[in-house]
Amino acid sequence: MAYEPDRQLDAARTPEPWDRVVTEAAPREHIVQLYQDQDFLNRAVCRFAGAALANGEGIILVPTLRHWNAFRPRLEAEGVDVDAARERGQLTVVDADDTLPRFMRDGMPDSPVFLGLAAEVIRKARAGGRYKTVRWWGEMVNVLWERGDVAASMNLEDLFDQLGEEQNVALFCSFLMDNFDGEVHTHMLPRLGTNHSHLIPVDDYARLERAVADALRETVGADQARVLEDRLLSDYREPFNMPRGQALLLALRQFHPTVADPVLLRSRNLYTAVSAA
């Protein structure tokens, strides 16, 4: 992935709303990102890792080789000496495809084996106490998801949630998942809400909020849209921290399912139309 200096400078002046979530990730927080393009993944992961390095924290990355080959040049372009960070033990890179088979048994994660392996990785990342605070980003759950092993993927997410609590680490994972898919909203996001503290559903939160608001007005009318939005957001119990537009979509799914799909489809069209422009 080519480095984009102008875009980086713009981002530094006007941070994306998800920027603070990943840069200020605290121990025991568990963040999940939905992405569909490599650039969004690169920016989020490298910001999470770069903030850890700048803060003097340990950072563990568990990518596939393909994604590590995209992350590394971006980190280096942003001023990170990757080799030096690995040499001093502050940056740990573990191959996701190589690690998964070490704890999978009969198609499911073996809890004691996984927790033992992960705890050892974290112990080494603390480097004898030099890096007491540690962050972990990985995509083993996404590897399972992309294979269609949904039960195994969600089981592993539960184990990661347990790991974060036991080891006092900040966790961040990314799924190749379409946030404008009705099945994702119906089945996957409620499930992810059981073991994550924050959801990053899209790159541009302001554009999402405008798209959802306009889609709701077009679907039910302006007067009804105002009434629905206020009532839904006051009644809805958010499963995780997320942008307002996303909460409105999920509240519609829960309280007005017949309206949810048309609004979601129109939101997709409005969101992507602005992106294309």
Image: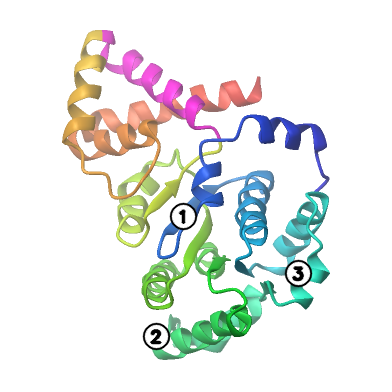
Q: Give the left or right position of residue 228, taking residue 139 as reference.
A: left
Q: Residue 106: horizontal and vertical position, in percent? A: 44, 87
Residue 249 sits above or below residue 26 on the image: above
Q: Are marks 3 and 1 in contact (CB under 8 Å)?
A: no
Question: Mark 2 or mark 3: which comes first in sequence?
Answer: 3
Residue displayed at 19% across by 17% down: 227
- Magenta stretch encompasses residue 38: no
Alpha carbon distance from label 3 to label 1:
25 Å
Secondary structure of residue under mark 2: helix
Residue 57 sits above or below residue 244 on the image: below
Q: Main secondary structure of the magenta part?
A: helix
Q: Is residue 36 visible?
A: yes
Residue tagged by mark 3? 85
Question: Mark 3 or mark 1: which comes first in sequence?
Answer: 1
Q: Residue 169: horizontal and vertical position, in percent? A: 47, 69
Alpha carbon distance from label 2 to label 3:
30 Å
Type of the residue with mark 2? Ser
Q: Residue 144 — which label? A: none
Residue tagged by mark 1? 32
Q: Give the left or right position of residue 228, taking residue 31 as reference.
A: left
Residue displayed at 42% across by 26% down: 209
Secondary structure of residue under mark 3: helix
Residue tagged by mark 2? 111
Q: Residue 205: horizontal and vertical position, in percent? A: 48, 32
Q: Give the left or right position of residue 62, taking residue 265 as reference.
A: right
Q: Which residues are magenta?
A: 204-222
